[in-house]
Image (spheres, rainbow, N blue to C red):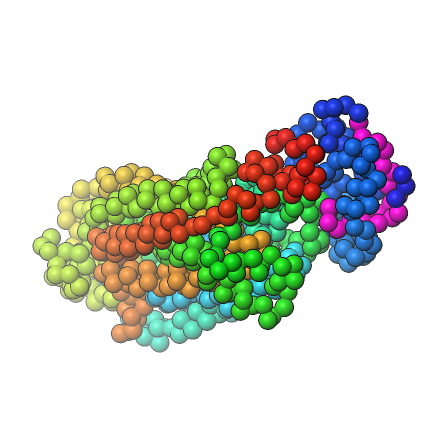
Amino acid sequence: MAMPQNSTRENGFCFAQTLNFSHPSPHPGNAGRTFGAVSGQDACGTPLSNGITSSGAPSPSDSCAEPLCSATPGEEETQLEEGIKYVSAEEEELACGWGGFTPGCLQLCNTSKGVLFFLCVASFLQGMTVNGFINTVITSIERRFDLRSYQSGLIASSYDIAACVCLTFVSYFGGNGHKPRWLGWGVLVMGLGSLLFALPHFTTGQYEARSAAEVGVCGGNQSLPCSQAASSLSSYRFVFMLGQFLHGMGATPLYTLGVTYLDENVKTNYSPVYIAVFYTAAILGPAAGYLVGGMFLNIYTEIGREIGISPENTLWVGAWWIGFLGAGAASLLISIPILGYPQRLPGSQRYIVMRVSEAHQIKDGSHKKASDPNFGKTVKDLPRSVLLLLKNPTFIFLCLAGATEATLIAGMSTFGPKFLESQFSLSASEAATFFGYLVVPAGGGGTFLGGFLVNKFKLRCSGIIKLCLFCTVSSLLAIFIFFIHCPNMPMAGVTQMYNGSALPSGYLNLRAACNMECGCLQETYSPVCGSDGIMYYSPCHAGCKKVFEDHRNGKKVYHECSCVNKTLLPGPGPGHARAGKCTSSCVKKPLLLCFMFVVILFTFLSSIPALTATLRCVSDRQRSFALGIQWIVVRTLGGIPGPIAFGSMIDKSCLLWQDQCGEQGSCYIYQNSAMSQYTLIAGLVYKVLGTTFFIVACLLYKPPPPESAPGSSDASENGNSDLQERKPSLPAEEDI
């Protein structure tokens, strides 16, 4: 039977040429499975070949011409006339391209896997930039622009502030609009934010590292006018905040519309896996940011300029800006293919009719309003949409649980490298690399494993919430590891007196008889490790009179240091010191790193299950908007206050502040015991709250009654329940 050149919207076909339907295969095992042989081309310009007998269910990447249902020969014509609605090919464009430019080669990417690839690249770049590079270079930016920890916390929180401002608008209107266009423009804005973040490097003067060798060792010229020592670079924090604001604006569609776009275009069973892969890329991004950013920090910020200090020196500022230039350019490029995707993928309509609702049932039945096809398309429905979500206690408590987890993730990701740097006496680049090694297997593996478990055990909404509860309790138990800490490396005049006696907490005494005549300046901080195993504020404060360079490693070695006792470390004779911090030999280091790994693993293990539970406990038409509201709650209560609160706590544990002619700058040395105690208290509070919220969400969840579902559980999983209601005589399709 010849058919006109039309496409069908309901069943997801996108035919553009004459279609010829033949009779189905008479084989009894294939009856109800073959719709007819289809010949011609689809709207994408690619040949169609359908009606092939298949023994398995379609995969998420099947073409749009795959049949949805079958018919016996006698019913074929009636079913075609009654079950298919004809619309013009121009009414809905399903081809991949930009405007009228839709070359056939692009249609190879016009699948759910193609979308997943480009969204993974975008989320990888977002994670690498916002959660990787920024957290890696935070110490260098503080040092370069004279910022305090709470100011750098404000920079980190600007991302979440922008997201809160944009989320309602983007999730509500973007959820009912052309999602790929919102996503593409968002990635482009994110790229502009990265380029803006690197701008201060090019608009400021050259960084001058005032090493002790330049100012002079003991007995040298120690004059350093305050006009040169002090600076007003801290005002550049507003440029960094604006760059982060653009990052937040651009990433807003990515984790709301991007997730729902994937969920709408794949089979329900596959959705957690697709989302897990998407979020795994977002987790691997920060890990790559820590590793690559750590490499860049080993390059001096003024590339090509000779400098007399090494990366281990606390005055060293690495090339923090290179990563932002590369990530910004890559984001601009990746936005182009995302902008070319259609509003929905070919064949995606089949997965919508297959889906069985697991939305929480509200007592007054108001949740049924969201089933109206016209609901949510105008601004007047916005208050009603918000009210429906507020009436859903499962959704509310899942949001609150997500906020508690986000607080810890945001705080630890921002200041985690600084924690390792202080506890283990590492340089900024070494700490960033260490933290990257933790995040790659723990964060990335936990994220993917969470989605895999949901798919493997085919968990329903209540089971998913119980899995989240188990993960939260496990991480709660592991967080007690912060009871232990590595002791501070002894520093003369800061943690102890020069004669080895205890120094009252909060007091500095950098002057002693051995350096009294040196005229040392407190503004010049350049720690050295003495041959006695004690750190000193600078070579001058160690009483060193001569300096040489070790040609084996390029580090400076200071001799004739009057404050340094007889040698305990290998070196050229007594009374010498080497540039940089003393190496920590903390025996608790492996144990601390192991349990930090467990905390990160179980924290990220619950992320995809919690997201999946959020998508399932609300109606289909509210999914994008629900994710938007959830992100607002998570960022307002977690992402924004998290870095600020952690930064303030870390500032309280500071032992030695930078002194710029009486003005307090960034922190040089932290008290490790206080830092661990504050981290433990914050972790316990938020993990206990998260556990409580997941318990309440599980207890209050009310699934739909069995009779309200379009079919049985098995049928819904197989995606044929809707079709079976209309054609009960049709056999069910096998699950793969």
- Which residue is at the front of the view, 132 or 249? 249
Where does the image place residue 519, in percent across and percent down from the top left?
21, 67
Report the side of 29 relative to 150 (left or right). Answer: right
- Which residue is at the front of the view, 160 or 498? 160
The mark total stands at 0
Instruction: Kindly identify the residue that appears in the image at 39 percent across and 48 percent down.
Output: 698
Report the side of 341 relative to 646 (left or right). Answer: right
Where does the image place residue 451, in percent across and percent down from the top left?
49, 41
Instruction: Kindly identify the residue that appears in the image at 42 percent across and 57 percent down.
Output: 393
Among the 4 quarters of the image, the one containing residue 523: bottom left
- Give the prevailing secondary structure in the magenta stretch: loop
* Quadrant of the image containing the C terminus: top right
Report the side of 257 relative to 484 (left or right). Answer: right
* Quadrant of the image containing the N terminus: top right
Where does the image place residue 458, in percent across and percent down from the top left?
50, 37
Residue 17 covered by magenta stretch: yes
Residue 293 covered by magenta stretch: no
Among the 4 quarters of the image, the one containing residue 58: top right
Range of magenta residues? 4-25
Instruction: Kindly identify the residue that appears in the image at 46 percent across and 71 percent down.
Output: 238
- Which residue is at the front of the view, 107 or 77? 77
Among the 4 quarters of the image, the one containing residue 681: bottom left
Q: Can residue 304 be seen in this view?
A: no
Instruction: Kindly identify the residue that appears in the image at 82 percent across and 45 percent down.
Output: 81
Task: Looking at this view, name the residue that lies furthest to the right.
Answer: 2
Report the side of 217 relative to 730 (left or right). Answer: left
- Which residue is at the front of the view, 15 or 388? 388
Where does the image place residue 362, in percent across and percent down from the top left?
48, 57
Q: Is residue 237 visible?
A: yes
